[in-house]
Image (spheres, rainbow, N blue to C red):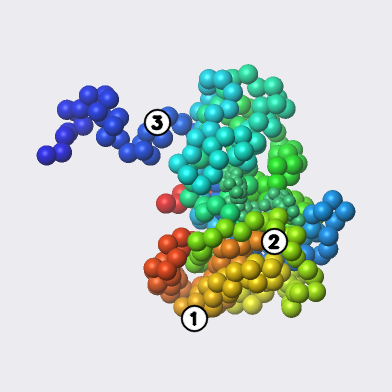
Amino acid sequence: MQAQRSDLTDHEARLNMSASDLKAQHFNYWIEAPAKINLTLDIKGKRPDGYHELETMMHQITLVDRIGFRRGGQGIRLNTDSPDIPADEQNLAYKAARLLFEKFNLQEGIQIFIEKNIPVGAGLAGGSTDAAAVLTGINRLFDLGLEEKQLLELGGGLGSDVPFCLLGGTALGRGRGEILTPIKNGPKLTIVLVKPDFQISTSEVYSDFRMDRVKKFPDNEAFISAWQSCDIISVSRQLNNVLESVSIQWHPRIADIKEQLCELGALNALMSGSGPSVFGIFTRYEIARQAWAHIKQQYPQTYLVSTYKKGEKYD
Ligand SMILES: C[C@](O)(CO)[C@H](O)COP(=O)(O)OP(=O)(O)OC[C@H]1O[C@@H](n2ccc(N)nc2=O)[C@H](O)[C@@H]1O
Ligand SMILES: Nc1ncnc2c1ncn2[C@@H]1O[C@H](COP(=O)(O)OP(=O)(O)OP(=O)(O)O)[C@@H](O)[C@H]1O
């Protein structure tokens, strides 16, 4: 027979609580940290600092990590439910916290929890979005008064994707990816996202990139025009990521997944960032759901997601 709540001692009740109840009780402030996909990614050249000059359409989706905070104690303490990421100063979220602690000489400590739902090393900016959420969270919790422009500048020092993760929505990224132009009034996308069971190093992909191996470059102007007309068919036609020329050569399975998504009804499919995640865009939710159920049997890390809107809650 199941014990009633009132029959339990405090300790038993705590043991009976789900991990998420415990987390909710301990961490009293939570921020969502959404993943991003690159709808286009163009490389304009290599810069003197070794980075690549980009022009990329970035887009937040409803696959989110949740970052919990609690003020108090000494210094920065970080925990996570994921065995795949470091729970120490190696973590990009920890580095984000340290940046603000040092800059503002904060005396009171903070405890941070990363509920990890975004696959790691997937081309989905998982580390960057956690870091962005930590900058936002500490700014609010400690009333630091940092404005968006200052946060974006601090974020850019942590990683090229962090500024976009701070800004959110849909934006064109130039420079290293940190010079951002928001692109408003787009459609709400229905997406099936597949993360195959291997990871790819972003820096290795960039260092193997050769302009003369790219067959077709993105047309961002045409993309933006299609986007602002909410014309999903034209948007799908304009999907293009030049880093596929590296990652698909290393892992032909990425091309297989793209093909499979299209066979299952996607208008088109593309690798995100440096890969290996692949997403397909669908016009109808029911077709997307069937494709998701089918591909999930082969690739357990398959997600049915859509365009992320701030303020809405997602499971
Ligand atoms: C592939 C993308 O995710 C697309 O949004 C980003 O360009 C990568 O963003 P990120 O992971 O935040 O990148 P960073 O942590 O700043 O850099 C990782 C490595 O990627 C390479 N890198 C990154 C961005 C860029 N514009 N040019 C580069 O060559 C650099 O070798 C760098 O050492
Ligand atoms: N909070 C974090 N979440 C995920 N990875 C982290 C985090 N902190 C550090 N890392 C490390 O960063 C590396 C890249 O992971 P991440 O999931 O950010 O890759 P990614 O999605 O390919 O990033 P991007 O799309 O920005 O290139 C991994 O080796 C991981 O261990």
Pointer 2: residues within 10 angstroms few (<14), some, or many (20+)? some
Query: What is the count of numbered marks?
Result: 3
Disc 2 marks a residue whose amino acid type is: Val
Which residue does the numbered mark 1 point to in the structure image?
263
Residue 238 horizontal/vertical position (percent) = 67, 74
Identified by mark 1, the residue type is Glu
Q: Earlier in the sequence, mark 3 or mark 1?
A: 3
Q: Is residue 248 visible?
A: yes
Disc number at residue 111?
Answer: none
Based on the displayed image, in which of its 4 quarters is residue 247 positioned? bottom right
Residue 57 screen position, x and y as percent:
69, 62
Per the image, label 3 sits on a secondary structure element best described as helix
In this rendered view, identify the residue nearer to me: 278 or 245. 245
Between 179 and 88, the one lying in front of the other is 88
Compared across the picture, whether 315 is left or right of 187 comes to left
Q: What's the mark number on residue 25?
A: 3
Label 1 vs 2, first from the N-terminus: 2
Is residue 149 something one can see in this rendering?
A: no
Please tell me whether mark 2 or mark 3 is closer to you in this view: 2
Is label 1 in contact with label 2 (beta carbons under 8 Å)? no
Label 3–label 1 contact, CB within 8 A: no
277 lies left or right of 219: left
Picture layout, residue 251 above or below residue 139: below
Few, some or many C-alpha atoms within 10 Å of disc 3 (few <14, some 14-19, many ≥20)? Answer: few
Distance from mark 2 CB to nearest ligand 1 atom below 8 Å: yes
Q: Secondary structure at mark 1?
A: helix
Which residue matches tag 2? Answer: 205
